[in-house]
Amino acid sequence: MNWNDYEAVWKRQPLPKGAEADVSELRRSFETKSRKLEATIRVRDYTEAGAGLVVTVACGFIWAKHGSSWWPMGLIMALMLGLSGVFIRERLMARRWRVGPAASLLAKVEADLAVMRRQCRLAEKVWLWYLAPGVAALAIHLCLVVRDAAPGSVQRDPWLLTGRIFFYLSVILFTWWINWRTLRRRLRPRLAELEKLRDELRAEA
């Protein structure tokens, strides 16, 4: 997933104040923030699901080009399809949680809470469901390239291999950092805001 794009969308929104937020302000801004939240997640889900499918097709062409000896590309394709499936599932779950415009404010807040809890869980476990499949796919592809490279070729140069591995690890760690920062600065504080607003609405009921 391009979590950098996800972070860029979040950056266009002010940082949530968490449990210290004013309840009246939370009421006033809820509808706007709810629409932005839904749009942000929708863009991410469609983009990531589509990207996974494109990579899957590309891997299929590479496999066909190199022949049956490159059968591990099928494993990469399975990993990419799995990632696409995660985001497709997220779209289906988001539709299930969505409430109509005529619903009460409390019902709308409860729906956003369910979505936000889900986003927090995804962010907390990003190593398991997102980064690990990506690392595995990169490792498989790199092994295939090195295996079939001619002795003494550039692909087998130890310095080049070290550089590629370092680059891959840097991208992975940067992606994790972006995800962790989004979780700490935006997702968890917004979750706290929604919980505070929900508690206030329940007290009024």
Image (spheres, rainbow, N blue to C red):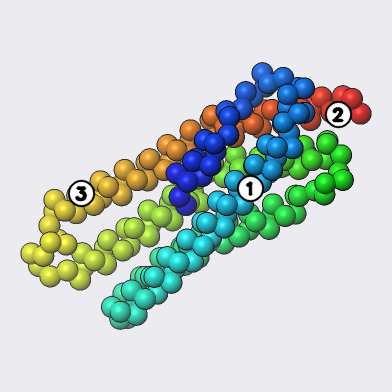
Decide: marks 2, 3 in contact (CB < 8 A)? no
Q: Amino acid at mark 2?
A: Arg
Query: Which of 144/28 is in front?
Result: 28
Query: Which of 28/37 is in front?
Result: 28
Q: Give above or below for 188 relative to 97.
A: above
Residue displayed at 72% across by 19% down: 22
**Can you tell which of label 1 and label 3 is closer to the viewer?**
1
Residue 159 placement (x, y as % from top left): 13, 50
Quick one: label 1 or label 3, which is nearer the N terminus? 1
Q: Give the image quarter of residue 204.
A: top right
Total tally of numbered discs in the picture = 3
**Can you tell which of label 1 and label 2 is closer to the viewer?**
1
Q: Residues within 10 Å of mark 1 (few under 14, many from 20)?
A: few
Q: CA distance from mark 2 to mark 3?
A: 56 Å
* Residue pointed to by mark 2: 202
* Residue pointed to by mark 1: 39
Residue 18 placement (x, y as % from top left): 64, 24
Tell me the quarter of the image containing the C terminus: top right
Residue 35 placement (x, y as % from top left): 69, 43
Decide: marks 1, 2 in contact (CB < 8 A)? no
Kind of element beneath mark 2: helix
Residue displayed at 62% across by 23% down: 17
Would you say residue 202 is visible in this rendering?
yes
Q: CA distance from mark 1 to mark 3?
A: 38 Å
